[in-house]
């Protein structure tokens, strides 16, 4: 449930601690996860991951709007229960965000990721980040004992970049090489 909150908080920060499960799940390697960024977005190397932490896998900077640099990031967090469903995870995340006053949830619904090939979740919320009111658009995918969250952050009230929203829907593992 922390991953959605952390993704909102990690738009530019280093990874934050996460609960450590009793046994690490076997997962698809991080390198096999991709998101197709909008043309012209500047990619950055994420900070190194710390053991038992939520990992910031990628971060990209988009246009500056009203003094705020738009961002897309992808994080991954270990699921304490690898059999957890996307519906249960979404309900837990929404309750956590609301209970801890991290923002207001505007959209929470099932949706497709991986260009329509995988079940996922779609969240949209607003909150405060570094003293600025911002809007978070997120896609969630559960796979191999991990939760992957792609987040597009922009100033609250700024129009959404359609290419950035489409990029979120591309959160997907690459086919394995034989």
Image (cartoon, rainbow, N blue to C red):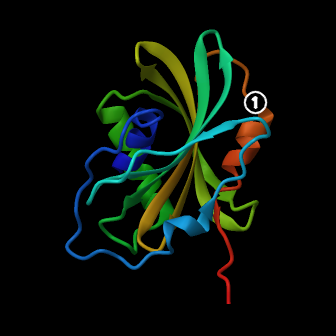
Q: Is residue 94 visible?
A: no
Q: Judge from the rendering whether residue 93 lies leftward or rightward of residue 112; answer left or right.
A: left
Residue furthest toward the left?
22
Q: Position of residue 52 (x, y in %)?
A: 26, 59
Residue furthest toward the top?
66
Q: Position of residue 156 (x, y in %)?
A: 59, 17
Identify which residue is drawn at 45% across, 41% down: 7
Q: Pick whichever, 59 or 164, lies toward us.
A: 59
Q: Circle 1 sits on which residue? A: 161
Residue furthest toward the bottom?
178
Q: Position of residue 162 (x, y in %)?
A: 79, 35
| Mark 1 Cα shell of 10 Å, populated few (<14), some (14-19), many (≥20) | some
Q: Pick whichever, 109 or 82, lies toward us.
A: 82
Identify which residue is drawn at 23% across, 68% down: 21
Quadrant placement of the C terminus: bottom right
Determine whether 54 is above or below 31 in the image. above
**Based on the displayed image, in which of its 4 quarters is residue 147 positioned?**
bottom left
Identify which residue is drawn at 40% across, 79% down: 26
């Amino acid at each position: 449930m922390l991953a959605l909150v952390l993704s909102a908080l990690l738009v530019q920060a280093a990874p934050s601690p996460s609960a450590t499960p009793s046994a690490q799940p076997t997962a698809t390697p991080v390198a096999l996860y991709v998101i197709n960024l909008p043309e012209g977005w500047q990619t950055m190397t994420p900070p190194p991951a710390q053991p038992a932490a939520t990992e910031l896998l990628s971060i990209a900077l988009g246009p500056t709007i009203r003094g705020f640099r738009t961002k897309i990031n992808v994080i991954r967090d270990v699921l304490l229960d690898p059999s957890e469903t996307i519906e249960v995870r979404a309900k837990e995340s929404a309750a956590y965000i609301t209970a801890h006053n991290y923002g207001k949830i505007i959209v929470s619904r099932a949706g497709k990721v991986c260009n329509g090939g995988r079940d996922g979740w779609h969240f949209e919320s607003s909150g405060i980040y570094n003293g600025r009111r911002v809007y978070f658009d997120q896609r969630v995918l559960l796979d191999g004992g991990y939760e992957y969250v792609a987040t597009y952050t922009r100033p609250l009230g700024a129009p959404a970049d359609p290419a950035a929203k489409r990029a979120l829907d591309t959160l997907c593992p690459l086919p394995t090489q034989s």
